[in-house]
């Protein structure tokens, strides 16, 4: 193939020439992608011009739009003090590590961030990963063997499912909120090996909380290890923002937490496992995404340290209070409009719409009204359970929330999806 060094980036991939793919694969992929376009499950990416925030500029929109689909729960993604900390760390610790942690990729700040996370959560030790996807991918494989059992909640994130798949332990699934199912799984696991229960703290497509106050005692009763992925709760759920376990009053009873720096904690990237020190030491020696992948970049570490400092201070309290007040307001108003949404204190608010084409069409029309939201459909959620997932932030103003509610109401009527209530009772 001839490489044209002067081809503008925007024209990469547009040159006509000999097809690079075998014809069979090309035909298959184009058929499958067409199917996705037809059934409304094709995922197009919108280009943001500028930083993340409650109001953003999109490349294909004529004016700025209000953003209701970021995990920017506390509004820290473009926080001046976090950016300054990241910039400073860039100066003091350089751009990249060019190494994995155990060769020559561990700096003082990596250790500092691990200690800061442990201090925040009240755990014994923490190990950093370049994402929470990697943390979940590296947790199970070398910890558990064929004699062990993993009991996984039904709505768990893809990264837990993939992490579990990598290990040889027996697998069981319980419906995330059915404690009798969990108990049956625990009782039915006649093994001399380990029992591990793993659940998201908050299920990302639903905004529903795992009932950790009831899961933890069962784990204790049957001697199971409890692992919680708290990606959608760290920083803002619970009185001090420690997450779902704090919210449920069982912070001390979780053996291992996994979470991300890519959502409320500044929203850049990076993840961790935090908990029992013996486990963390084992992961440093045997967890493959840690051993065989580059260290978290220094500027990300510096930014995450500042984000944690903010979250643990007075500003964190203020932002959490604002986030929960915004969430309560939005949920109440949307329910009053007649939309079908679940009951939860969480800023993920799924507006249930049923058909993928309705969710995609309505999201598209909302964008025309200046409200940026995303329709989710199969395979991300079950068939027939398509929805628009709204995400509230502490950075949204009351006026912005009202603009979104008004636009939803107008379009909800047009699409005929606000008929879910009869006599004030949800069907
Ligand atoms: C529950 C859960 N776990 C893990 C992840 C992955 O986090 P990261 O972006 O750090 O890989 C996500 C992100 O969507 C998530 O929602």
Image (tube, helix red, strand yellow):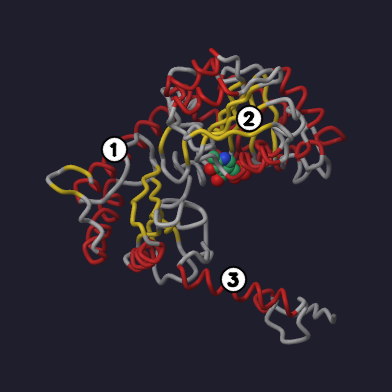
- Distance from disc 1 to disc 2, alpha carbons, whole Å, reads 36 Å
Callouts 1 and 2 close, C-beta under 8 Å? no
Callouts 3 and 1 close, C-beta under 8 Å? no
Tag 1 residue: 328
Crowding at dot 1, Cα within 10 Å, few <14 / some 14-19 / many 20+, comes out as some
Crowding at dot 3, Cα within 10 Å, few <14 / some 14-19 / many 20+, comes out as few
Callouts 2 and 3 close, C-beta under 8 Å? no
Asked if residue 422 is positioned above or below residue 370 in the image, the reply reads above
- Distance from disc 3 to disc 1, alpha carbons, whole Å, reads 41 Å
Considering the numbered disc 3 on the image, is that residue within a helix, a strand or a loop? helix
Asked if residue 208 is positioned above or below residue 371 in the image, the reply reads above
Tag 2 residue: 150
Q: Residue at x 80, y 77 (%)?
A: 5
Dot 3 or dot 1: first in sequence order is 3
Q: Tell me where residue 372 appears, x and y as whole percent.
A: 40, 59
Considering the numbered disc 2 on the image, is that residue within a helix, a strand or a loop? strand
Q: Tell me where residue 8 appears, x and y as whole percent.
A: 70, 78
């Amino acid at each position: 193939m001839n490489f044209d060094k002067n081809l503008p980036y925007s024209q990469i991939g547009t040159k006509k020439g000999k097809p690079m793919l075998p014809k069979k694969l090309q035909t298959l992929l184009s058929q499958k992608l067409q199917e996705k376009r037809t059934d409304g499950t094709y995922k197009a990416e919108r280009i943001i011009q500028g930083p993340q925030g409650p109001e953003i500029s999109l490349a294909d929109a004529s004016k700025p739009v209000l953003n209701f689909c970021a995990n920017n729960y506390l509004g820290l993604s473009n926080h001046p003090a976090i950016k300054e900390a990241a910039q400073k760390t860039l100066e003091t610790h350089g751009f990249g590590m060019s190494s994995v942690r155990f060769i020559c990729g561990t700096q003082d700040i990596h250790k500092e961030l691990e200690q800061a996370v442990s201090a925040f959560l009240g755990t014994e030790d923490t190990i950093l990963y370049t994402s929470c996807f990697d943390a979940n991918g590296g947790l199970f494989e070398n910890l558990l063997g064929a004699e062990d059992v993993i009991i996984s909640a039904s709505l768990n994130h893809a990264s837990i499912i993939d992490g579990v798949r990598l290990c040889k332990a027996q697998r069981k699934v319980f419906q995330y909120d059915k404690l009798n199912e969990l108990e049956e799984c625990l009782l039915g696991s006649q093994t001399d090996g380990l029992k591990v229960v793993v659940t998201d703290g908050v299920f990302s497509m639903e905004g529903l909380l795992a009932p950790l106050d009831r899961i933890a005692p069962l784990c204790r009763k049957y001697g199971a290890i409890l692992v919680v992925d708290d990606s959608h709760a760290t920083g803002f759920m619970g009185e001090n923002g420690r997450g779902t376990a704090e919210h449920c009053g069982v912070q001390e009873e979780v053996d291992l937490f996994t979470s991300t720096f890519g959502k409320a904690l500044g929203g850049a990237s990076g993840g961790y496992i935090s908990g029992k020190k013996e486990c963390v030491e084992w992961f440093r020696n045997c967890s493959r995404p840690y051993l065989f992948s580059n260290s978290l970049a220094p500027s990300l570490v510096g930014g995450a340290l500042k984000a944690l400092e903010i979250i643990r201070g007075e500003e964190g309290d203020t932002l959490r209070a604002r986030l929960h007040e915004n969430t309560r307001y939005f949920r109440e108003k949307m329910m009053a409009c007649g939309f079908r949404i679940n009951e939860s204190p969480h800023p993920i608010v799924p507006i249930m719409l049923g058909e993928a084409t309705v969710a995609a069409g309505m999201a598209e029309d909302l964008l025309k009204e200046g409200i940026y939201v995303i329709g989710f459909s199969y395979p991300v959620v079950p068939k027939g359970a398509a929805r628009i997932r709204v995400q509230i932030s502490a950075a949204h103003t009351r006026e912005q929330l009202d603009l979104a509610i008004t636009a939803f109401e107008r379009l909800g009527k047009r699409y005929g999806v606000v008929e879910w209530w009869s006599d004030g009772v949800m069907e």
